[in-house]
Amino acid sequence: MDTPPITSMARLAAAQHGAVSVKQLRGAGLTARAQKTAVAAGWLLHVAPNVVVAAGSPDTWYRRLWSGLLALDGKGWVSHEAAAALHGLDRALTDAVEFTVRRGSRKLTCSATVHTTKQLGPLDLVTINGLRSSSATRTIIDLARARIPEHRLEAAIDSAVRLGLSAPIVLERRLTELRGPGQWGARALDGLLVDSGGESMLERRFLALMREAGLPRPTTQAIQRRDRRHVARVDFLFDPFAVIVEVTGRRGHSLPTERGRDAQRRNELTDLGFRVFEYTWAHVTERRAWVMSTMRQRLIAAGWVPGSLTSP
């Protein structure tokens, strides 16, 4: 038995947060006359020349994204600030509605911000909750090109790494591919990638201190196991020297159960032969020289030869 047009339309609307394109209505079997009747009765509301929404559906951010994509008739994708929010990147603007289309695409009416691009790679687009979007890597590059504030770009990079959506080497490679004479002048991104690899602003600051002090760059988020059992994922591992460093945020762990887990974790890492050190937010941000000095002393004691960035 064929599905009635109104049922097909309702299913489409439900899957797209209330938004449906006129093309989809026709595909579902709803005629222009039936559409006009539904609009006159208040069952459908026009939000763009070729897009309607179901009456009663909430005017959410997702509905606005769907409406924009439908208005662009499959030629666009969520990008920039909106894509950052869709990926869940830190410090993203959660109410942004932005899209990108290929340069030269037929102009379509869309009330949101629409960017254009000449370059689009096979890995630049992904689908999130049914929405076509730029990948986290391409989103970060787009945000850098748009010159968002540095602290927000830092947060976007670090959270993308933390969430497993990108990696410094992937960002560097794609930026190189997109860069050209007079294009993609993302100097801020070039600079920020130097100290990327951690998962937070605090970890980024610690990596910067190691670089400024001329100390070896540690492995970030290194997993340690014992008898094939997971022991810990540590913030920084200076592998050749069996030195581990953890950095603690402003709040740290204050509950007895959290402190107990931390103590057990530290003891097991010590049993594995590591020397474990900890620096707080205040240490890394307010006592920079002390952190660099103590790390230099600790690495030398562990066998590091000053001036060498590799194992002795």
Image: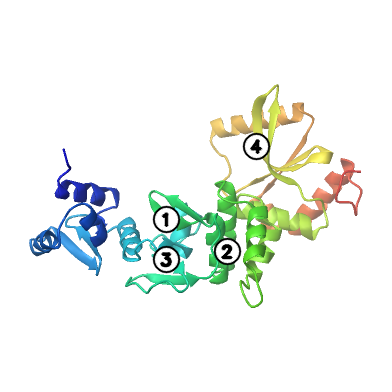
Q: CA distance from mark 4 to mark 2?
A: 29 Å
Q: Which residue is mark 2?
A: 141
Q: Nearer the viewer, residue 151 or 102?
A: 102
Q: Position of residue 133 (x, y in %)?
A: 45, 57
- Front label number (1 vs 4): 1
- The local crowd at label 1, few if under 14, some if 14 to 19, many if 20 or more residues have their Cα within 10 Å, is many
Residue denoted by label 1: 132
Measured in 3D between alpha carbons, the distance from the residue under mark 2 to the one under mark 1, in whole angstroms, is: 17 Å
What residue lies at 44% left-to-right and 51% top-to-bottom?
127
Q: Quadrant of residue 26?
A: bottom left
Which of disc 1 and disc 2 is earlier in sequence? Answer: 1
Looking at the image, which is closer to me, 42 or 242?
A: 42
Q: Quadrant of the C terminus?
A: top right
- Badge 4 is on which residue? 233
Give the Cα separation between the discs numbered 4 and 3. 37 Å
Which one is in front in this view, the residue at disc 2 or the one at disc 1?
1
Rounded to the nearest angstrom, the CA distance separating label 1 from label 4 is 33 Å
Residue drawn at 67 percent across, 59 percent down: 172
Q: Is residue 54 above or below residue 181?
A: above
